[in-house]
Amino acid sequence: MNRCILCQSIIVSPLLFADLFFMVKNEEYLCSICRLSFRKIDKNCCPSCQKSGSSELCSDCMLWQERGHPICHTALYQYEKNMADYFVRYKLWGDYQLRFAFSKEVKENLRKWRGYTVVPIPVSDHRYQERGFNQVEGFLEAAGITYYPLLKKAEVEHQIGKGRRERLEMEQVFELKQSLKVSKGVLLVDDVYTTGATLAQAKKIIYENVSQNVFTFSIAR
Ligand SMILES: [Zn+2]
Ligand SMILES: [Zn+2]
């Protein structure tokens, strides 16, 4: 009997005969009410970064394109109230069990990048010590995805209080831990895509040093 990791109610899932026969592990961690409370990425979204609301290239993506860093991003869910609450519980309160919430979707979606080297966006040493885990590595580990922690983050001022344009113009905050040869390309994974600044910086350093075939992915956008 599984309980929803968000609301603790019992998860009722129709067990298929095939599941019993093959002893398939029930990978459902959310009840249907909690699952449906998160909004998937709207079909009407920016073709580059999946920002909801318009199918035109958004102004941030236009800016990145002008600077020679076109965005090619995939996200699972919209970053709205319920998702923000979820991240407060997972990241700020440090409820590590919540890393399983989207494991099924992460696993399914990342099949598209089979053969790619998966690189999580790192957290700073300070944050890591505070929280005890890297939330992105948590998602990947929960989904059974092999990843390569190639990037290291320097401690910089928190982004809160800075303007959008200022955030888009921030200096490189990542460094490579070591050199790496990849066969197909790199998939950079983050938890939330906000302005695209974090992933753009990570993408740049990968593009210049590891592979020119770089895609980005996040749980929320
Ligand atoms: Zn629930
Ligand atoms: Zn966009």
Image (cartoon, rainbow, N blue to C red):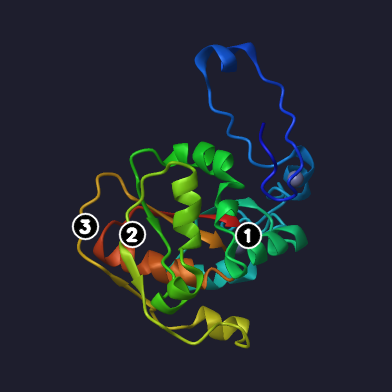
Mark 3–mark 2 Cα distance, whole angstroms, equals 11 Å
Q: Which is more toward the observer, 96 or 181?
A: 96
- The reply to whether residue 166 is in sight is yes
**Residue corresponding to mark 2:** 149
The N terminus: image quadrant? top right
Q: Which is more toward the observer, 202 or 26?
A: 26
Residue 81 occupies which quadrant of the picture?
A: bottom right
Residue depicted at 75% across the width and 49% down the height: 7
Label of residue 180 in the image: 3
Tell me the element at label 3.
loop
Side of 88 relative to 179 (left or right):
right
**Residue corresponding to mark 1:** 221
Q: Residue 131, how many percent across, how many down?
A: 50, 70
Quick check: 66 above or below 167? above
User: Label 3 crowding class (10 Å Cα cut-off): few <14, some 14-19, many 20+?
Assistant: few
Residue depicted at 46% across the width and 37% down the height: 111
User: Label 2 crowding class (10 Å Cα cut-off): few <14, some 14-19, many 20+?
Assistant: some
Label of residue 84 in the image: none
Residue 149 occupies which quadrant of the picture?
A: bottom left
Q: Which callout, 2 or 1, points at the residue further toward the start of the chain?
A: 2
Residue 61 occupies which quadrant of the picture?
A: bottom right
Number of numbered tags placed on the structure image: 3
Mark 2–mark 1 Cα distance, whole angstroms, equals 22 Å
Indicate yes or no: mark 1 CB to ligand 2 under 8 Å. no
Q: Which is more toward the observer, 186 or 159?
A: 159
Q: Identity of the amino acid at label 3?
A: Leu
Residue depicted at 33% across the width and 66% down the height: 151
Q: Which callout, 3 or 2, points at the residue further toward the start of the chain?
A: 2
Q: Residue 68, how many percent across, how many down?
A: 42, 69
Q: Residue 24, how many percent across, how many down?
A: 53, 22
Residue depicted at 56% across the width and 82% down the height: 159
